Image (cartoon, coloured by chain):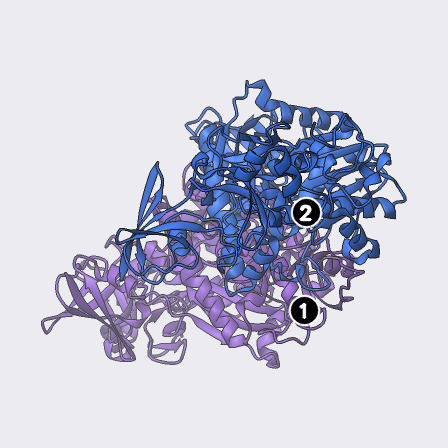
Chain colours: A purple, B blue
Amino acid sequence: MNYTVRFKIAPDADIVYSSPSGLTVMEAARQAGLDLDSPCAGNGSCGKCLVSVVTAGKEEQRLACQTKIESDLTVIVPRNLLVSNSKIKTIDPNDEKEQRIFENLQNQLEELGFTGDSGLELVTLKLKEPAIDDPMADSERLLAGLHNAMEISLHALRKLPGVLRQNNFSLTCVLDRSCGVLKVIDLMPTNGEAACKPLLTGLAIDIGTTTVAALLVDLSSGKVLASGTRANPQIPYGADVISRIIASTRPGGLELLRRAIVDECLSPLIQEMARKAGIETCQIYKAAVAANTTMTHLFTGVPPEHLRLEPYVPAFFRANGINAFDLGLHIHPEASVLIAPSVGSYVGGDISAGLFASMLFKKDTLSLFIDLGTNGELVLGSKDFLVACACSAGPAFEGGDISSGMRAAEGAIDSVRIDRKSLEPVLTVIGKGKPWGICGSGLIDLVSEFFTCGIIDSRGKFDFTHNAEKQPGVIRKRLHKDEYGMGRYILAFAEETENQKELFISEADIDNFIRAKGAIFSAIRTMLAILNSSMNDIENVFIAGGIGSGINMQNAISIGMLPNIPLERYHYIGNSALAGAYAMLKSQKAAQKIDEIAANMTYLELSSHPSYMDEFVAACFLPHTNSNLFSIAPNANTRACT
Amino acid sequence: MNYTVRFKIAPDADIVYSSPSGLTVMEAARQAGLDLDSPCAGNGSCGKCLVSVVTAGKEEQRLACQTKIESDLTVIVPRNLLVSNSKIKTIDPNDEKEQRIFENLQNQLEELGFTGDSGLELVTLKLKEPAIDDPMADSERLLAGLHNAMEISLHALRKLPGVLRQNNFSLTCVLDRSCGVLKVIDLMPTNGEAACKPLLTGLAIDIGTTTVAALLVDLSSGKVLASGTRANPQIPYGADVISRIIASTRPGGLELLRRAIVDECLSPLIQEMARKAGIETCQIYKAAVAANTTMTHLFTGVPPEHLRLEPYVPAFFRANGINAFDLGLHIHPEASVLIAPSVGSYVGGDISAGLFASMLFKKDTLSLFIDLGTNGELVLGSKDFLVACACSAGPAFEGGDISSGMRAAEGAIDSVRIDRKSLEPVLTVIGKGKPWGICGSGLIDLVSEFFTCGIIDSRGKFDFTHNAEKQPGVIRKRLHKDEYGMGRYILAFAEETENQKELFISEADIDNFIRAKGAIFSAIRTMLAILNSSMNDIENVFIAGGIGSGINMQNAISIGMLPNIPLERYHYIGNSALAGAYAMLKSQKAAQKIDEIAANMTYLELSSHPSYMDEFVAACFLPHTNSNLFSIAPNANTRACT
């Protein structure tokens, strides 16, 4: 028995799906091509997948993962629940601003001498045509003409006789030296009627637990031809890597997760980028992937289950010599796929690639690299040593575990100021529309502003009395206690939001956030202690990650998330994993350097350091139990609202 | 509309097939799994596919390729028309006779120092188990334990975490060094519950135009575990390489022919051999293929069309680094597949491999290698030089173009003696049953005996007068002229044959045969002339090919097919291409030697030598127009019957 389910992604689209009876709304949505956010992997505990279900004229709020389909119904899906809407940008090669970030990186690669060694080469040549007295075979004729080329791939060999005779033995070859020998992996007639003009392109990919980002790069010029992002379609299997690993151990689970990332995410993302850039996907001859250790396993189809079982061992740090065909990636079948090497179970290739992009490994003085993703990873070091650790900051920086939290996407509040006089919030929203929720950078601002204005105390609890004295009207309007006595502050009223739902932050949310910032700060303190260094020894801090359009470093310091050192030492470097993948793509020497970085990085297991728990507890205050650490503000910073 | 077609492969099997209307009987038979012999590729010109068709109680002889199915019918298929019945033999490792031929070859490999270097290795090891303070990844742990291994394949990596934990980190690895670096391509738990016990096996394959032969070899001991042959299922696309090349140029034709050899022939052959030998096909880690240039192209899916167009250039002589998966061969997916290198368009890898097996390349003195297949290939040389040529002997040695001709299979007359007194034929038949036809070795005997007894003259025409004087009864019974005045000799009367059809040889058949033997002899003469040598300089003649259980060399000399030199210089070496493939499989040095042999062989295009046509015309007599060449019989040899 099938029922008609109408998914309304109001106001712009309806999807009608004929669903077998007994599926949940979440399952039916997936089958209809809609991935709904599901941090708890569909077990009904997180409450994030709330949708409006209309049956027989009656509208009810229901959890999509817990609602079975037993009649025809209409489901109104809040747009922020949808995780699969990919964003593809064509980069105008002449738009300087767009290219600048990669030009910077290219300049840095050039400074290092890491240039012109992508391992791929386009060679155009004209061969002597065969004759009765010169009956050398096509393949041997080509290899002799190429001097150094030793091998021709089966794929190219199958095309060879036709290509040679299309334009009098003039042809262009794609040579790949990534596997040791120089190998012909593709060929096309020169000035022939080939569908594609000779062009060497490659893909840089960052597979995040939550978001996948990719660049399509012209390997000859280094120019970015298109960029795109897409939600990781594994999200319905759980928000964090542990739930994904558990999902992979179910029968067929690993293959399901592998296909989710390869077939449901990368393939369409690649196709869209290629279309936008006006190339064929078979012209993509190389790919470089940076991802955390779990994502690397799921992407390659290697069982990750031992990552979460003592003694927490990955199946591999490094994986070489893999080609696109074996991974099911729809680019040139013989394209080599580089995977940034992992350092440990919870410090992955995204960190080794990202650390390269930060150029920390060249610094003479102590520097800190922080990647704020679904988890927090930190590297402390210089050109002489590197120490890495992961801390379970939890998903708060990506909007997880926060009532009105969301990823840094359209509709997210990404910065907040509390007016010192009126105590009213002043918000900015990504996309400039009405807000849906609040993302990581907005939360940092919000907590910092609350604390600075005295709206919350150093344990993150609302100070009803003091504030009501100052602004009784606003406080009455915005600050409430819920039925359990927990305080909440309304950031936007239902009529002001996109989904007509009150947008608020509760004391529980602030508590989750404080634990997240505490995890980061205590990790820094623990590492410094082990290295016998102090905060002030840190000359550079590189903050990476997609938690917003940027972070207000001052605010992050004032809440005790980042060390109280001069602001000019802070550098927000965006998606460094993607930038590192770009470097691997462009230069074999860069890839080798990233290998060295990973091999030389010492992995520190924080939980095995007795001082870490004490540091963590001490850091779960605003700004810290030891207020001396933040007593001298590096810049003008007033504690109280005057 | 479907009709019921009952194929009777009398008396032992009926196959009932529901055929769409409009198919030919040949096409319906193919779809029902029966491959019918079709030398003319189904265009109705050769008349070989004659079957009995019974419709509505009426029985008629019809050509299967020309008869459309337009009603229910019964088709009686003569058994010799079936080409797909494969023959698989399990070799008893203790049966000395069966192993002897490969023991001889192994001994020769050992003499050359070509031993223990198959490139594959089984290594058993026990790794230290990981711990909290030793969290090295599985892959890095394994590679460190293997010292020299540099890489692990994706296939093996995916199995690694499970295999390691099945028996406390004890495991057995299959290492492959064929691609330069030492690579782990498979692994299994030691003493675990794996389906297959560790065993390294390989396949030697000879893809002939007509017959495919293969050996399953234990790579550690060199023992042959099973051997098998199967008709080449491309036969319905034409008997010779030229028809196959033409068939490959039709839309989808190349893929059709590639699948015929890989999916319809090799896959079932490999499966049957593996079953007989009690191993799994995934335990086959290497393959070596020897084949003529056209077959090599069709097997790899590389367009062969320019082989038959001036200036007759192959797409490749050598193809390296191909693995089983890319070829669609159902053995271990990462098994490397070696292909014996070709020398020219009509001197293929079967010749370079076969020449190695003959050990001619080690001889101090002039030696001759002849491969009698669907075509004839010759190599003249010594350890100092090698000259190769191909002559269009045509398919006569394999029974083609001969009225009652057939391949050397069950039912074939493989030797003939004419009783000197009665002039009655004395036949031996392969399988010892009633005869179906006559194969190459039988034809050599028959023509030799006819000529020796004076039944035919030196132009191959029957001498009615002279023979009728001697044995009027026999001659009246057996020697006839057909309606066009062409003589024919009945070898077996309808009631004596398996298919109840008269088995005869006509003057046209003898003419075809004389052209075939003339092509061989004139090729030898031309090569000798170019090298300024004489017949008597040839110290060894190696005859290879599957033309029968062996050749009566004396008879072959007496008809002027082979040089008139002492019989002890002749060596029948059987399927030398298969033996060469076996050597490639066993030893990387042997494979390298075969590469050198091919690279150093000079290809001689006979048709461009003006003397060849004259030589050919002169050789199209019995024994030769210059009877001095055969005047002094090397052994006792009486011209006339006394």
Numbered disc 2: what chain?
Answer: B
Q: Amino acid at mark 1?
A: Arg
Classify B429 as above or below B31.
above
Q: Nearer the viewer, residue B392 or A301?
A: B392
Residue B437, given in percent of the width and then of the height, sits at 52, 40
User: Which quadrant would the N terminus of chain B be assigned to in this image?
Assistant: bottom left
Q: What residue is rendered at 59% in x and 18% in y?
A: B96
Q: Is residue A85 toward the left or the right of residue B567 in the image?
A: left
SS class of the residue under badge 1?
A: loop
On the rendered structure, is B28 left or right of A582? left
The one of B430 and B255 positioned closer to us in this rendering: B430
Residue B413, horizontal then vertical, whole percent: 55, 34
Q: Give the residue at mark 1.
A: A165
Residue with the mark numbered 2: B516
**Residue neighbourhood size for the residue with mark 2, other residues' Cα within 10 Å, grouped as few (<14), some (14–19), many (≥20):** many
Give neighbour class at mark 1: few <14, some 14-19, many 20+ (Cα, 10 Å).
Answer: some
Look at the image and tell me in which quarter the C terminus of chain B lies. Answer: top right
Evaluate whether residue A622 shows in this view.
no
- Give the camera-side residue of B199 and A514: B199
Secondary structure state at the residue bearing disc 2: helix
Front-lying residue, B213 or A509: B213
